[in-house]
Image (spheres, helix red, strand yellow):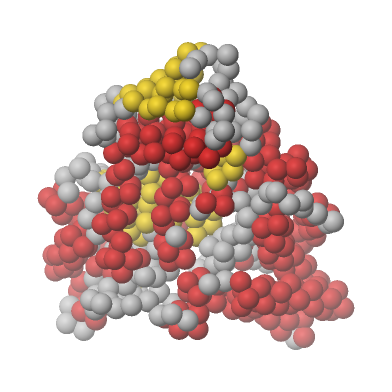
Amino acid sequence: MPLSIADFASLTVAFDSTSGPLNHAADELFSHVGQSARGSSGEVAVTLIAGARGSDGFEVRVESPKVTVAGDSPRGALNGVYWLLEQLGFLWVRPGAEGVRFSTGPALADGTYREAPSFPRRTLILGCDALHDDWRDWLEFASRNRLNSAFFHDTPPSVIRPPGSRRPQSAREIAADGKGWLFERWDDDGRAIRREAAVRGVALQFGGHHLPTLLDRSLFAEHPEWFPSRAGARDPRYNLCTASPGAIAEVKARAREFFARFPGAAVYHLWADDIRGGGWCACSECSGWSPSDQALRATNVLAGVLAEVAPAASLAHLAYHDTIAPPAVTSPAANVCGLYAPRNRNYAFSIDNRDEHYAELLGLAKTFSGRADSLGVFEYYSDAILYKWMDPPNLLVLPADAVGYQRAGVTDFGDLAVTPRPWLGPTWHAWWFARCAWNSHVDRPNELARFCNAAFAADGAAVAGLFQRLDSGFRQLLDLGDLERIPRHDVLDFSDRPREALSRKARQAGQAMEALNGAAAGLTMSPGGLGAGFRDDLAVSLAMANHLAERLQAWDAALRGDTASAFAHLGSARRHLGALNDWDARHSSPAYANLSSKMLQAASWHTERIAALTAG
Ligand SMILES: [Zn+2]
């Protein structure tokens, strides 16, 4: 007899109660089936078993009314329990209680079911204060969707402040401060974060662009030789001179304090400054080393300190912007892992298709080969900074990426969640990442239908169709074509070079918006699902998409000398941006203001630059 939720009305669970994750797995079973099975008469006995392996796959044996969940490890058993709950009709489609969805129907036949993840480590990267405020909900969401690692990262970067400093309260003050407050969050909640992560068998990661944080710029006056040489003179901006013994001693001392203040992570991140070009040292000693080599030299030094204070932990070498190429002459220390962050890639195509970045990844894989947990990927599927307030579904690209990353030997697949505005409705992007990280050969139509039916109830099939049309439109909008990048600007700021590439991009953006606006037109949602939130979220996403597309078309028209068309598109670009500003003022909590304020100003700056070009 196949088991259904009704059979769990009288549930018994046998498990080793000394294991935190097994306790949590039992709690999750009881709390989920308790409500839904009430009133029926079934009697199921579940046994939870945990092996001692490093992996977190599982086997579930169903011999009705007995169920055995055997994990490779305690985390594996917890994964098995979430798999079991999914078979009974549960799904977790956004953080928080609202995201726990149940639909009756499915049943589980007798048999043995075995699953193992495509990537040993699967990481949700929580990248800003507003998401850190809700870390409990995000950690639970990640764990329930079988991610096994949570990375506390900060955009904008946090700074070392006097003890007892508090984050400002109002949006205006937070925007004016313009910094991250992760350090104070960890001071307050670090103990609780470590406890809740341990209970779930979730590894922690911590940090960001904090190599420069370790060298106080005010030391320049006394020790200019600690700082990089540029154009023949020492310069206090960015990073350090890795050939300077004084600079090395200083960052080692500060790193020791950093690891002591933020204990408990499996992987630390102390990356260099977040810029392209000009960040490193050209003194007589350093000039022979590439930016990647200088960055790895600094990382190796800090890894030496980490090996003393936390021998089991690793430190990441970030391959990003001008450190994207593998180091040529420096070898990573034993506790240094690689982290590949392809921010400048094209999201219209998968990472291994038409993209030079895949070659860089393979180079990095070679540098870090032969070590466990050697190679991480820092991806951007839930990055509403890169995507400029939008949240494209990445329906095709994400699973194709997962296949490419697995083929390259990636051991830690991570998704950066960072946003200047709250996500309304289900967080498909984060859910879809978790699915593809678990199984790179995911059954795309089946999983899309499963998500949409859970999240949108009666509208499930319609929204699944809509997702496919949106994915196609967004891939057109996100395509970078042959456009060169503007230095120090993000990828979707686009550029006007080569000139013909801008014309092609402007036409393509117009077509993308026809597809996207057409797909969303007349969207109605019935009650019973999370459709209302989804519809509001889509409106925000499409306001920015329309703004970007109109801006590109205005730019192209201005350069063509078609002033009338340029003004028409500019008017439309301003209207959509105005709607976003209004939305921001009404709906965002102050915690988003250290990101939203600058981003909205930048969008306005780009628009008015085109207006000046048109008028001139
Ligand atoms: Zn130097």
Residue 311 is drawn in which quadrant?
Answer: top left
Q: Nearer the viewer, residue 106 or 158?
A: 106
Q: Quick check: 106 above or below 179?
A: above
Q: Quadrant of the C terminus?
A: bottom right
Q: Nearer the viewer, residue 331 or 213?
A: 213
Q: Residue at x 74, y 77 (%)?
A: 574
Q: Which residue sits furthest bottom?
A: 616
Residue 371 is drawn in which quadrant?
Answer: top left
Position of 322 with respect to 214 (left or right) is right
Position of 369 with respect to 605 (left or right) is left
Q: Quadrant of the N terminus?
A: top right
Q: Position of residue 428 (x, y in %)?
A: 60, 48
Position of 558 with respect to 530 (left or right) is right
Q: Is residue 98 visible?
A: yes
Q: Residue at x 50, y 83 (%)?
A: 172
Q: Quick check: 169 above or below 485?
A: below
Q: Position of residue 576 (x, y in %)?
A: 74, 72
Position of 312 with respect to 7 (left or right) is left
Q: Quick check: 426 above or below 399?
A: below
Q: Position of residue 462 (x, y in %)?
A: 78, 43
Total of numbered circles in the picture? 0
Q: Position of residue 556 (x, y in %)?
A: 77, 68
Q: Residue at x 50, y 35 (%)?
A: 33
Q: Residue at x 68, y 81 (%)?
A: 608
Q: Is residue 606 visible?
A: no
Q: Nearer the viewer, residue 547 or 188?
A: 188
